[in-house]
Amino acid sequence: MNDIFEQMLRQHSPSGEIDKRNAVYEVMQQVILGGLYRGGFFKEAAFYGGTCLRISPLCSVNGKSH
């Protein structure tokens, strides 16, 4: 993995294998969303309904995804 990805992963402080896997998924999601944003994807499209991602604050109420 590259240095930036590792830095982002360390912010999650995964303690076990399941935590590490979940942290990797979350960091990957952040990287992908960042790329989509920088590429202008959200000027033309948006996530709708059940496509909301877990890390989006708009999709979370009291820390739980919907």
Image: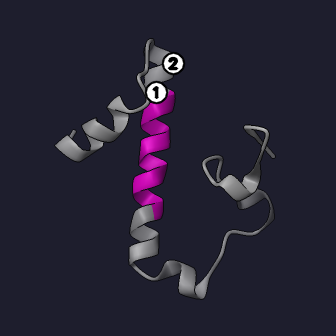
Q: Which residues are magenta?
A: 22-33
5 vs 30: above or below: above
Distance Cα–Cα, label 1 vs label 2: 5 Å
Magenta-drawn stretch contains 17 = no
Disc 1 secondary structure class: helix
Label 2 amino acid? Ile
In this picture, residue 30 sits left or right of residue 51: left
What x and y, as percent, mark residue 24? Answer: 42, 35
Residue placed most toward the observer, 7 or 28: 7
Give the residue pinned by disc 2.
Answer: 18
What x and y, as percent, mark residue 11? Answer: 38, 33
Q: Label 1: how many residues lie within 10 Å, few (<14), some (14-19) or many (20+)?
A: few
Residue drawn at point x = 49 percent, y = 41 percent: 26
In this picture, residue 59 sits left or right of residue 38: right
- Seen as rendered, the residue at the extreme top is 16
* Residue 2 seen in this snapshot: no
In this picture, residue 62 sits left or right of residue 8: right
In this picture, residue 41 sits left or right of residue 66: left
- Seen as rendered, the residue at the extreme front is 62
Residue 27 sits in quarter? top left
Q: Label 2: how many residues lie within 10 Å, few (<14), some (14-19) or many (20+)?
A: few
Residue drawn at point x = 44 percent, y = 15 percent: 17
Marks 1 and 2 close (CB-CB < 8 Å): yes
